[in-house]
Image (cartoon, rainbow, N blue to C red):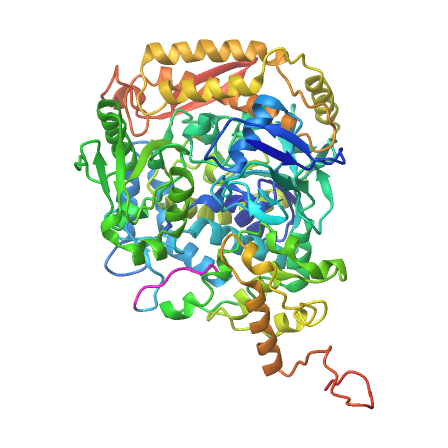
């Protein structure tokens, strides 16, 4: 029986776990938290699928492709959209409590960039309910969970370029452990937390898996494409779902006038808001006209969070908003079997680049992607492991990483990494955010280089072996810095504007030079970037 | 503002003085960790009340740190009924353990149309974020550590009462022992739920359903003098 190790207990990890289990593999899910605490719990809007005759798969594909601004792969998008109705039905049979329409069919709402209402939802808790439904099913299937394990590195046999497992820090005990497997699936999520308080993401979305993948020799793709959600609460960056606009909410500028099509693609709406904030100081979301009954029932989370974090009630008040980093389109490059450039290493969900979102993701396609590709990835990884079981090769990754942890514990602490982390988030939001230009990007790269040099002068202040979250956050910061360098480098190299990547110094799209993916790899420690299919 | 935190290595709560007002307890602890004391240990995630990571007790009552705005002198303690790993971080294995014991999953969910009203019946129960506030507040654990408990029983009711479920009798069987009849219906779990779920009510519903299927409350004594043991059939 093949042993499949899944790293990450969010939606993508749990769907892959069920699928690999169904394919006959022994499955272990390793996660840095309890699975139900993953980023997936925060997804609100819905999961796109064409269920009725009033819409068509061709329309879903066309919308996705259009939104991707030339970087979506047509065959991958076809795979996503064609499998969408089945994915939604599958979730329904697992027990996901979808909201219903008047006829009793799974209810759908229209999200930005969609030509029809096709986001199937469960109130504004779609991600939460999906994640919990999946977790319950994994328990039913008897899948083994190793929680509170922080990924350190993928174990790779260098001569054969084959993944053998992973090393991790057991957060609770402070010990470094290794888990061997015949196939490894990365399902570690995105890197939005790099933007700190300017991100809608959970504090745990630190790109650990993507950073570990490039260290393991895997190629990454399109890391400069980061989606900014148009409507996050101004002070806390907490997400106000697109469904608020889908239901008829207005965007108002400082003069309380509408200024854009509220249901345009996210990159366009986010930039329009950015420009209004720059010009007039404030932008508001107005959902007062939707009425208390509707707001309480369809947007209960939003109402509560606006009250807690902004001190306003959306039933009676305007909601102050700003765009915030929300979704990582870029990620670990995978083929159509979800395998990375390292043999036996797979990737799925937000940490992967399935080439379905391209330069800008359509709302409602991320939950869909993790279900469709999760089912596919679990199966292909299980089959790979079955056909090519890995011998227990000697490898020194465990001892290297054990040494690394003790070394990090003795770093000098002359520089406070929390301060550096905050300043990294600020300069990223300002210079590698909605609007970018060459000089600013290069200045950011200099700052990152300096921070990388200073890492040994930072380190955790807390010297406890047991449950050292200060140490975990320091390693997360290391991963952020690693990805920050790559993102800034890609953003400099992509000297054009496309989707979420907008360069004020080169505002036009240039298909001739940049109509292909940004492929990233490391050679002798140096980040290499090229544009290719 | 003065905040007291019960730490694991000290008898007396540690006092932190912070000049921040109108913010959540989580924002305050993040400020402490980043600017004052990196050893302070707690869990967090979404900061928006859906991931269930940051539940603690404030002045004896369970809250989510990301939704609670503290007052001067508040005492912050770890959750109860689970061993403390460090400071405010407690063992979370109860989630997996009791979910497995109680079979809190869908057995078989039929396709086809379901009315809006029918789905409303499980809307609140499926809002559960597994923060385990109800588990911490439950007094039954003091006498029965094997009690399946409020969150797992609510999740059982969520699946049993799902209009799409076709096979739920085995679930009812799984919660007879150390389950629905061990609850004292004290209701401590109800006000602490950040999602407005009432596990006590769900447990009552499971009792009614169990009775309809022929199960009886083992604590009841119908003997009236001569005790021939618990009535079973």
**Magenta-colored segment: predominant secondary structure:** loop
**In this rendering, position of residue A359 left or right of residue A258:** right
**In this rendering, position of residue B210 left or right of residue A302:** right
Residue A218 in the image: x percent, y percent? 54, 26
**In this rendering, position of residue A205 left or right of residue A502:** right
Pick the quarter of the image with the C terminus of chain B: bottom right
Q: Is residue B188 above or below residue A475?
A: below
**In this rendering, position of residue A499 left or right of residue A141:** left
Residue B58 in the image: x percent, y percent? 60, 44
Q: Is residue B197 magenta?
A: no
Q: What are the residue bounds of the magenta stretch?
A: A95-102
Q: Residue sitting at 69 percent across and 49 percent down?
A: B80
Residue A242 in the image: x percent, y percent? 32, 44
Residue B113 visible? The answer is: no
Q: Is residue B76 above or below residue A506?
A: below
What count of labels does the image hold?
A: 0
Front-most of residues A530 and B102: B102
Front-most of residues A200 and A369: A200
Q: Residue sitting at 53 percent across and 49 percent down?
A: A15
Q: Residue sitting at 26 percent across and 30 percent down?
A: A282
Q: Is residue A330 above or below residue A181?
A: above
Q: Quadrant of residue A308?
A: top left
Q: Quadrant of residue A317?
A: top left
Residue A453 in the image: x percent, y percent? 57, 9
Pick the quarter of the image with the N terminus of chain B: top right
């Amino acid at each position: 029986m093949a042993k499949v190790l899944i790293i990450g207990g969010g939606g993508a990890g749990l769907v892959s776990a069920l699928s690999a289990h169904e394919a006959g593999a022994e499955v272990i899910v390793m996660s840095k938290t309890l699975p139900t605490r993953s980023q997936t719990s925060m997804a609100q809007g819905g999961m796109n699928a064409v269920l009725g005759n009033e819409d068509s798969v061709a329309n879903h594909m066309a919308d996705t492709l259009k939104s991707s601004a030339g970087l979506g792969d047509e065959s991958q998008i076809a795979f996503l959209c064609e499998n969408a109705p089945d994915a939604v039905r599958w979730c329904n049979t697992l027990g996901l409590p979808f909201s219903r329409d008047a006829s009793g069919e799974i209810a759908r709402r229209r999200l930005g960039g969609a030509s029809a209402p096709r986001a199937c939802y469960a109130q504004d808790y779609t991600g939460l309910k999906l994640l919990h439904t999946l977790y319950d099913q994994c328990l039913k299937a008897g899948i083994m969970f190793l929680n509170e394990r922080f990924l350190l590195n993928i174990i790779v046999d260098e001569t054969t370029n084959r993944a053998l497992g992973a090393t991790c820090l057991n957060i609770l005990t402070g010990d470094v452990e290794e888990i061997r497997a015949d196939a490894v699936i990365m399902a570690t999520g995105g890197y939005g937390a790099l933007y700190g308080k300017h991100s809608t993401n959970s504090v745990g979305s630190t790109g650990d898996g993507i950073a570990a993948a490039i260290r393991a020799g895997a190629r990454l793709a399109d890391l400069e494409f980061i989606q900014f959600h148009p409507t996050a609460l101004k002070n806390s960056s907490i997400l106000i779902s697109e469904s608020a606009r889908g239901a008829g909410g207005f965007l108002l500028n400082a003069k309380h006038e509408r200024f854009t099509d509220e249901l345009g693609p996210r990159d366009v709406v986010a930039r329009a808001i950015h420009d209004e904030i720059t010009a007039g100081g404030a932008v508001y979301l107005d959902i007062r006209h939707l009425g208390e009954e509707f707001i309480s029932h369809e947007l209960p989370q939003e109402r509560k969070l606006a009250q807690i974090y902004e001190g306003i009630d959306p039933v009676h008040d305007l909601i102050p908003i700003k765009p915030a980093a929300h979704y990582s389109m870029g990620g670990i490059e995978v083929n159509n079997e979800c395998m990375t450039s390292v043999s036996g290493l797979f990737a799925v969900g937000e940490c992967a680049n399935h080439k379905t979102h391209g330069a800008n993701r359509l709302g409602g396609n991320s939950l869909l992607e993790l279900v469709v590709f999760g089912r596919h990835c679990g199966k292909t990884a299980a089959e790979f492991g079955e056909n090519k079981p890995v011998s227990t090769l000697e490898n020194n990754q465990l001892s290297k990483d054990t040494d690394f942890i003790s070394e990090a514990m003795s770093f000098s602490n002359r520089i406070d990494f929390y301060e550096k982390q905050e300043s990294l988030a600020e300069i990223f939001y300002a210079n590698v955010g909605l609007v970018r230009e060459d000089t600013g990007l290069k200045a950011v790269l200099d700052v990152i280089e300096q921070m990388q040099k200073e890492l040994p002068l930072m380190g955790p202040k807390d010297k406890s072996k047991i449950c050292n979250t200060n140490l975990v956050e320091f390693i997360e910061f290391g991963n952020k810095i690693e990805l920050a360098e790559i993102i800034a480098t890609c953003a400099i190299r992509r000297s054009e504007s496309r989707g979420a990547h907008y360069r004020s110094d080169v505002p036009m799209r240039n298909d001739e030079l940049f109509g292909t993916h940004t492929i990233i790899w490391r050679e002798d420690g140096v980040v290499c970037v090229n544009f290719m299919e | 503002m003065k905040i007291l935190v019960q730490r694991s290595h000290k008898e007396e709560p540690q006092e932190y003085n912070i000049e921040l007002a109108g913010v959540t307890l989580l924002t305050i602890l993040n400020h402490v960790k980043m600017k004052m004391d990196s050893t302070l240990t707690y869990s967090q995630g979404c900061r928006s009340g859906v991931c269930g990571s940051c539940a603690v007790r404030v002045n004896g009552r369970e809250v989510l740190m990301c939704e609670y705005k503290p007052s001067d002198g508040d005492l912050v303690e770890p959750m109860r009924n689970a061993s403390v790993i460090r400071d405010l971080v407690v063992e979370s294995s109860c989630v997996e353990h009791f979910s497995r014991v109680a079979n809190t999953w869908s057995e078989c969910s039929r396709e086809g149309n379901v009315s809006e009203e029918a789905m409303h019946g499980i809307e609140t129960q499926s809002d559960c974020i597994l923060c385990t506030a109800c588990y911490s507040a439950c007094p039954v654990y003091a006498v029965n550590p094997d009690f399946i408990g409020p969150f797992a029983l609510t999740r059982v009711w969520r699946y049993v009462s799902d209009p799409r479920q076709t096979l739920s009798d085995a679930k009812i069987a799984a919660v007879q022992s150390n389950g629905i009849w061990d609850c004292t219906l004290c209701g401590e779990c109800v006000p602490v739920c950040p999602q407005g779920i009432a596990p006590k009510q769900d447990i009552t519903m499971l009792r009614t359903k169990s009775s309809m299927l022929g199960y009886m409350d083992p604590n009841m004594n119908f003997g009236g003098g001569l005790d021939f043991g618990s009535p079973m059939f």
